């Protein structure tokens, strides 16, 4: 693990989410299909981002248990969009690790005619520093 | 040439600490037109007022400037004072040297300089002021109440008891409103019907109240004290004066598959119907959407069985025009359509119901005779889940996904009626397991929190802080997935019924009505009050008063209190023989008006109309020109027309363009 610290500002800016809009109803956690596996649940995620406890989240396995099903986004009565926060922390952690996980040279072998162009571009963005 | 007196107030130290009041009075003496100036500790006191009236007499003042607090505070006081000694009250100006000067400055030199400028501006205006006389208009001593629910009934009774005639216009066949549908009322658990039906009877029998049931407002014209209202009496195909309410037609009517609105569609009714046993007026109505005779020319059975001969298939809507002095809007509410909240499976299972539907299921006069049976199979539910805040307290930014009809406000009554439902259910069926999922329990009100605590402590209702995420109908059960935020768990409950506390919204008829009344509304379609704290039952439109849910979510006692307050305001208006208007109203210079209609469009009160008028032109011809005319009784003096008018024909009396320019000139000098 590198010394790179994921900051609250970065997570808020990347996700575009305002966690202060949360009214603590817990509907995200009531909705979440991966709830039982998680260490920090969606509503805690929102609260922890608001309090700035990003490091705990960055270390947590919960980050990779979110299936990005978007149910929490769809059902949140306050339009808080918890899954976007999860994704933002996840992306920041991956970027922050410093390594380039995907090299352009490696691409040709991975190419598949059914793979959409968009997926390749997004993978390059996500896994390359 | 005016003879002006300037009076500078210290306001104790409020003004005098930051403004050299003596210097202001001194400076006034060298302003052209000023013949007298003085300063005093409290101008608004009796001694201060006497100082002003004495000076008017002694120096023959024709105009007065008081340099003191905001005109909002004491303009009326000083106007009354000068009027006592024969000066026109509109020959007085207040220069605000407190809120807009001494309170915002720290430096004495700066404060004094500004106070002198403000004084000079006021003097410049008084130089141009002309005496104004307020117009008078008579008051029609009759009130209109729109909506016949508990708010409208209470307002009508209070106004009628004070000795004024009242008409109630109710869109449904019977008055009674939502309260007539309720089973019990919180926090006393007294039977809703037992308290509302006697009120309905009282309204129906009151010699000063006339009910236009099954009627709607078609058009509103006129202004405070003098409204002309057209009421559409929808064709009910039954002569109200002949129908005895015997119900024979309902029994024989072959069309019995009409969804019963009174039971929230949980059962059906006949096509010719009296909505419920205690209806007022107890008169049948034919539903034109389902009647075989009206739609297909067949049947006609109700006419054959009606001993009173009251049925008339040829009936047409009738328009009635009445005059009123005051109008009370009491249009009430509806619950939102929850079908878009499909995670709760409302459209997928009949056992998922709204609270108002649950109310009917509990009601002895409801579709199940008061036995709690779930709609799908008629079984008694053993586990019931209540979901709070369905559609209430939502963020409604259309840029962030699909809007489902949610509301940004708290619907206010749900926490209490849910506690009531839970306790009543436990009373009748003690072995029922009840879960209430809440975000916050909001129970401010007399004996309200005690009521909710009783549900928890005495009845063992499981109150869980958290939300329901989804409901899945499966094998005759409703699988509820929810969160418990205190224990930090996800819960899975097999429920027999789910009850949704759906948000309440203003009646969909309110927006159109508000347009007709020129009464303002907020973004949620609730009527806005003239002042949220100090004038809570008046609309900003003079002569229109507000009662009940149409102004905002509230419970029955609050509604009754507000209705009484609205009635008191209406009575205060009706008790006057004539109304004295505000003379500071708009006025059009017909020679300058080019007939463009922009002022008419911009006027929020509908005070401006255009007329074709004959003008004798300088060349001795007669020309017909279209010009603006202001109804001075309707005009509220906002000035929107004067700034809109491109030709400068519109002017506001007491705030003429010339007067305002003179003030600006004085400030810039």
Image (spheres, coloured by chain):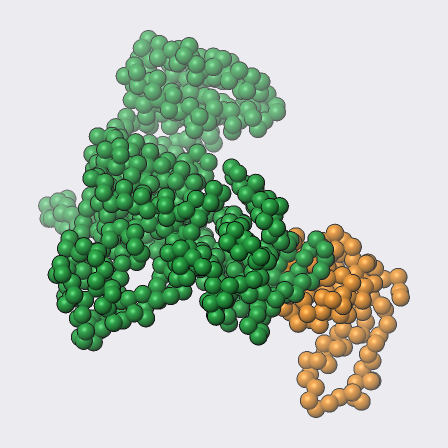
Chain colours: A orange, B green
Identified at 63% across, 68% down, the residue is: A71
Identified at 55% across, 72% down, the residue is: B476
Residue B426 higher or lower than B227, as above or below = below
Which of A40/B277 is in front? Answer: B277
Identified at 78% across, 87% down, the residue is: A110
User: Splitting the image into 4 quarters, where does residue A98 fall?
Assistant: bottom right
Give the quarter of the figure containing the N terminus of chain B: top left
Kindly tell me whether residue B499 is visible in this rendering.
yes
> For this view, does A87 lie left or right of residue B202?
right
Which of B546/B168 is in front? Answer: B168
> For this view, does B202 lie left or right of residue B402?
left
Which of A46/B265 is in front? Answer: B265
**Outermost residue toward the bottom?**
A113
Q: Position of residue A2 (x, y in %)?
A: 89, 65
Kindly tell me whether residue B600 is visible in this rendering.
no
Q: Position of residue B478 (x, y in %)?
A: 57, 68
> For this view, does B239 lie left or right of residue B536?
left
Q: Position of residue B510 (x, y in %)?
A: 36, 53
Q: How many marks?
A: 0
Identified at 35% across, 12% down, the residue is: B53
Residue B206 higher or lower than A89, as above or below = above
Q: Position of residue B69 (x, y in %)?
A: 47, 24
Residue B617 higher or lower than B574, as above or below = below
């Amino acid at each position: 693990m590198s010394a790179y610290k994921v900051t609250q500002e970065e997570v808020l800016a990347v996700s575009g989410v305002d966690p202060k809009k949360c009214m603590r109803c817990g509907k995200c956690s009531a909705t979440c299909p991966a709830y039982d596996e998680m260490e920090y649940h969606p509503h805690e995620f929102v609260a922890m981002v608001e309090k700035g406890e990003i490091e705990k989240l960055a270390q947590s396995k919960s980050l990779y248990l979110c299936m990005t099903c978007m149910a929490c986004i769809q059902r949140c009565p306050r339009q808080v969009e918890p899954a976007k926060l999860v994704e933002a922390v996840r992306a920041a952690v991956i970027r922050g690790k410093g390594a380039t996980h995907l090299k352009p040279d490696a691409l040709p072998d991975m190419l598949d005619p059914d793979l959409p162009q968009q997926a390749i571009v997004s993978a390059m963005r996500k896994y390359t520093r | 040439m005016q003879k002006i007196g300037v009076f500078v107030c210290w306001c104790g130290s409020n003004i005098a600490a930051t403004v050299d009041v003596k210097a202001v009075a001194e400076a006034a003496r060298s302003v052209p037109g000023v013949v007298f100036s003085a300063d005093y500790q409290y101008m608004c006191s009796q001694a201060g007022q006497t100082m002003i009236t004495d000076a008017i007499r002694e120096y023959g003042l024709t105009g007065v400037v008081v340099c003191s607090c905001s005109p909002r505070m004491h303009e009326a006081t000083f106007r009354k004072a000068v009027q006592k000694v024969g000066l026109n009250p509109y020959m007085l100006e207040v220069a605000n040297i407190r809120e807009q000067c001494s309170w915002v400055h720290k430096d004495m030199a700066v404060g004094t300089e500004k106070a002198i400028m403000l004084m000079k501006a006021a003097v410049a205006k008084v130089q141009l002021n002309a005496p104004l006389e307020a117009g008078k208009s008579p008051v029609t001593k009759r009130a209109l109440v729109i909506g016949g629910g508990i708010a409208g009934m209470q307002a009508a009774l209070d106004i009628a008891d004070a000795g004024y005639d009242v008409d109630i216009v109710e869109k449904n066949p019977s008055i009674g409103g939502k309260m007539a549908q309720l089973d019990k009322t919180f926090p006393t658990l007294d039977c809703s019907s037992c308290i509302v039906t006697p009120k309905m009877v009282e309204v129906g029998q009151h010699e000063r109240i006339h009910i236009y049931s099954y009627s709607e407002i078609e058009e509103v014209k006129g202004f405070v004290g003098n409204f002309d209202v057209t009421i559409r009496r929808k064709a009910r195909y039954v002569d109200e004066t002949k129908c005895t309410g015997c119900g024979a037609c309902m029994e024989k009517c072959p069309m019995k598959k009409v969804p019963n609105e009174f039971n929230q569609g949980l059962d059906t009714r006949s096509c010719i119907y009296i909505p419920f046993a205690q209806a007022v007026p107890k008169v049948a109505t034919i539903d034109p959407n389902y009647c075989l005779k009206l739609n297909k020319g067949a049947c006609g059975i109700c006419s054959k069985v009606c001993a009173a001969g009251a049925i008339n298939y040829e009936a047409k809507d009738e328009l009635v025009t009445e005059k009123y002095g005051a109008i009370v809007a009491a249009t009430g509410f509806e619950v939102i359509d929850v079908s878009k909240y499909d995670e709760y499976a409302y459209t997928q299972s009949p056992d998922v119901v709204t609270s108002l539907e649950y109310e009917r299921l509990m009601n002895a006069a409801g579709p199940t005779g008061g036995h709690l049976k779930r709609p799908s199979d008629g079984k008694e539910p053993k586990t019931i889940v209540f979901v709070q805040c369905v559609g209430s307290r939502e963020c409604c930014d259309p840029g962030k996904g699909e809007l489902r009809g949610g509301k940004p406000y708290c619907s206010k009554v749900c926490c209490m009626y849910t506690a009531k439902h839970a306790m009543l259910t436990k009373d009748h069926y003690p072995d029922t397991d009840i879960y209430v999922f809440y975000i916050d329990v909001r129970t401010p009100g007399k004996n309200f929190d005690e009521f909710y605590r009783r549900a928890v402590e005495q009845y063992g209702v499981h109150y869980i802080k958290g939300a329901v995420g989804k409901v899945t109908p499966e094998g005759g059960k409703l699988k509820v997935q929810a969160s418990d935020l205190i224990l930090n768990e996800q819960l899975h409950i097999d429920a027999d019924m789910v009850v949704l506390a759906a948000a309440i919204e203003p009646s969909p008829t309110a927006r159109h009505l508000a347009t007709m009344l020129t009464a303002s509304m907020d973004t949620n379609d609730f009527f806005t009050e003239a002042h949220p704290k100090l004038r809570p039952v008046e609309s900003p439109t003079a002569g229109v008063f507000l009662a009940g849910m149409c102004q905002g979510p509230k419970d029955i006692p609050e509604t009754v209190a507000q209705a009484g307050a609205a009635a008191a305001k209406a009575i205060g208006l009706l008790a006057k023989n004539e109304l004295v208007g505000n003379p500071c109203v708009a006025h059009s210079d017909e020679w300058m008006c080019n007939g463009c209609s922009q002022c008419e469009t911009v006027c929020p009160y509908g005070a401006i109309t255009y007329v074709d008028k004959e003008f004798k032109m300088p060349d001795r011809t007669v020309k017909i020109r279209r010009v603006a005319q202001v109804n001075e009784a309707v005009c509220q003096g906002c000035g929107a027309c004067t700034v809109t008018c491109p030709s400068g024909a519109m002017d506001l009396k007491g705030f003429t363009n010339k007067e305002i320019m003179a003030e600006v000139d004085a400030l810039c000098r």
